[in-house]
Image (spheres, helix red, strand yellow):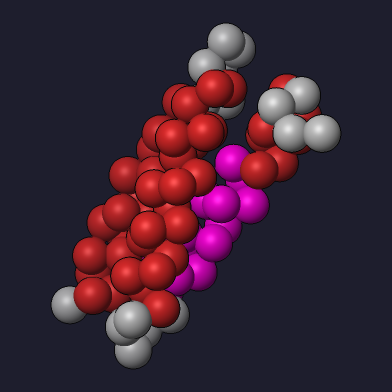
Amino acid sequence: MLNLASLIIGVVALIFAVVAFLPLLGWANWLIIPLAVIGAAVGMASRGTAGRNLNLFVIVVGIVRLMLGGGIF
């Protein structure tokens, strides 16, 4: 059940991450990354790994987008 919750959080965060790729919406990654961290924490509490892996992917995408846009470093 926790894996399903983690997958749902991950899909929502991924949809927001795709929207955040639009110009002038890169600031949304500062909100998406903590959401994905919560999803990854829920995924770590479950037996399955799909939700955790999806959220880790969203975290990496968000951080790379922030680095490309000058939001980090």
In the displayed orientation, state which residue is furthest to the top: 24
Residue occupying image coordinates x 54% and y 22%: 27
Residue 16, position in %: x, y?
Answer: 41, 34
The N terminus lies in quadrant:
bottom left
Residue 18 visible in the picture: no
State the image quarter where residue 8 is shown: bottom left
Residue pictured at 32% horizontal, 63% vertical: 7
Q: Would you say 66 lies left or right of 27 here? A: right
Q: Is residue 69 left or right of residue 56?
A: right
Q: Main secondary structure of the magenta part?
A: helix
Please tell me whether residue 61 is drawn above or below residue 56 in the rendered image.
above
Question: At which x and y percent is residue 69?
Answer: 73, 23
- 29 versus 47 height, above or below: above
Q: Give the range drawn in magenta.
A: 50-62
Q: In this view, does 73 lie to the left or right of 30?
A: right
Q: Could you say which quadrant of the image residue 68 lies in?
A: top right
**Residue at image x 43%, y 65%?**
40
* Residue 53 falls within the magenta-colored stretch: yes
Question: What's the residue at 70%, 27% (across, down)?
Answer: 71
What percent of the width, then of the height, locates residue 29? 53, 33
Residue found at the far bottom of this picture: 47
**Residue 44 appearing in the image:** yes
